[in-house]
Amino acid sequence: MNASEAWGKTKRFAESAMGGGLRASVFRGGAWLGLGSVSEQGSRFLRNIILARLLAPSAFGMMVLVLSSATFLTSLSEIGVKESLIRNPRGSEPEYVNAAWWISIGRALMIYAFLFVVAPWIAKFYGNMELTPLFRVANINIVLEGAISSRAYIAMKEMKFDRWAMASHGGAILGVITTIVLGFLMRDVWALVIGTCSESAGRCLMSYVICPHRPQIKAHFAAGRDLLRFSKGLFGLAPLSFIFMRTDIFVLGKLISPTALGCYALGISIAQVPAQFIVNLLSQIFLPALSHVQTDQARTRRIVLQVTEVVVLLGIPAIVFACFCGRSLLTLTYGKAYAVSARPLILAGCAALINIINVLITVVIYAAGRPRLHRRCVGAMAIGMVILVYPLSKWLGPVGAQWAAFISIATGFLLQLDYVRHITGIRISDYGKIFGRGALASAAVVLVFLAARPITISGPLLTIALGVFGCLVAYAFAGIMLVRKPGFARF
């Protein structure tokens, strides 16, 4: 295939994506959600860059403990209202929308009341009583998130992703701007606390502006029971997910200082924030999309493998970039104090890539209405994290915490893939081929740095520029491989 044929194939695909059908909905939805998520995550990244120079690292360390503790309690009562509304054929009916709102706000109020009471004990556990008021104020965001209009979730169900993007991401961006302003005015951890609440408040307000909903004081027990029936398969899933995702913070919070914890949290966020953006994007787009084709195994397999290949071809060169440029990236982004997190950042990137790939399998499971299969995977990850995180963190410090995360997610992914073979028809050898092509593309980054070895490179900016050039070469090569592949992007 020559260059003109490749361009023609890409052009025809782009034109067909603008037509009708599932593929068109996926790509249009992806454009809206991508724009919203990139704007939100970009503003968050800018916020971190600015606040890292205004606040001490210990402020970020305390804040991550506050939010992690709240997330743990929230996860204990996760019932999957959003997912249940999206999947339920009757989810758009007023009774279901109203029942979902009351379930969500009731759960949020109970969690906040409990957190308000236990805040002093949590602060005492970490030997820092300053955490008590931080807990009580920061976690108002739980109530605000619980009060979000249920109609915003229906917009996702109906694949009206523009509404969801404006409501969710637009509100969060308003809160991020507020946090930056508070950082200049307050110069302490309270800027982060109030800013967190403002993000949730902005998201809640925008959800009613874009997707109006007036909760009715009327009981819809049948609808509520129908929504909660889906949650049986989710029971225990959220706390297990939390154990996997946040055990490192709790363990390191006892083993290292708040300053070191703040450096660790901001350092790995460079990998985790874009990864979370991709996870949210994929789950929001492909849950309703795969729900439409859940009985077509061949089509499901094709979609999952194609998206996985794109993720791998983007992800592996980025990890190689972090290997060469991690310290320079952290120094340029946050300052020299944060460069100590270069090695945890590399491992966080590896774990994030496996997690994204695993999420695609998870979406298939949810679309098929069998979340209990995912619970086994998350249970394995949580057990692995609990067993490994303390000894590895004690031995290797923050690097050990990320080793525990990587080993756990890799184990969980392999188990989940085995669980769902009968649903997807995907084999481990399929992933072997995909990772092989990803490694081949990422070799371009290595070759660029090897070619530049005779040249004296001074300063983080030049190092990063060289790494970016290597990634662009790798992505160009990856793009050629994708376009030349038979059946490329044929959903």
Image (tube, rainbow, N blue to C red):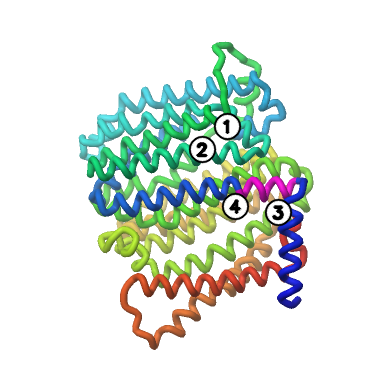
Marks 1 & 3, CB-CB < 8 Å contact: no
* Horizontal and vertical percent position of residue 225: 62, 20
Q: Mark 2 or mark 3, which is nearer to you?
A: 2
Q: Does residue 156 appear in this view? A: yes
> Which image quadrant for residue 483?
bottom right
**Mark found first going from the N terminus, 1 or 2:** 1
Residue under the point 26% across and 63% down: 336
Distance between the Cα atoms at labels 1 and 3? 26 Å
- Residue bearing the label numbered 4: 415
Of the pair 155 and 130, the residue shown nearer to us: 155
- Residue bearing the label numbered 3: 303
**Mark found first going from the N terminus, 4 or 1:** 1
Distance between the Cα atoms at labels 2 and 4? 33 Å
Residue under the point 59% across and 59% down: 311
Quadrant in which the C terminus is drawn: bottom right
* Horizontal and vertical percent position of residue 53: 26, 54
Q: Mark 1 or mark 3, which is nearer to you?
A: 1
Distance between the Cα atoms at labels 4 and 1? 34 Å
Distance between the Cα atoms at labels 3 and 4? 21 Å
* Horizontal and vertical percent position of residue 429: 67, 64
Identify which amino acid the numbered label 1 is placed on. Answer: Ala
Marks 2 & 3, CB-CB < 8 Å contact: no
- Residue bearing the label numbered 1: 152
- Residue bearing the label numbered 2: 168
Of the pair 115 and 391, the residue shown nearer to us: 115
Q: Which residues are magenta?
A: 22-31
27 within the magenta span: yes
Q: Secondary structure at mark 2?
A: helix
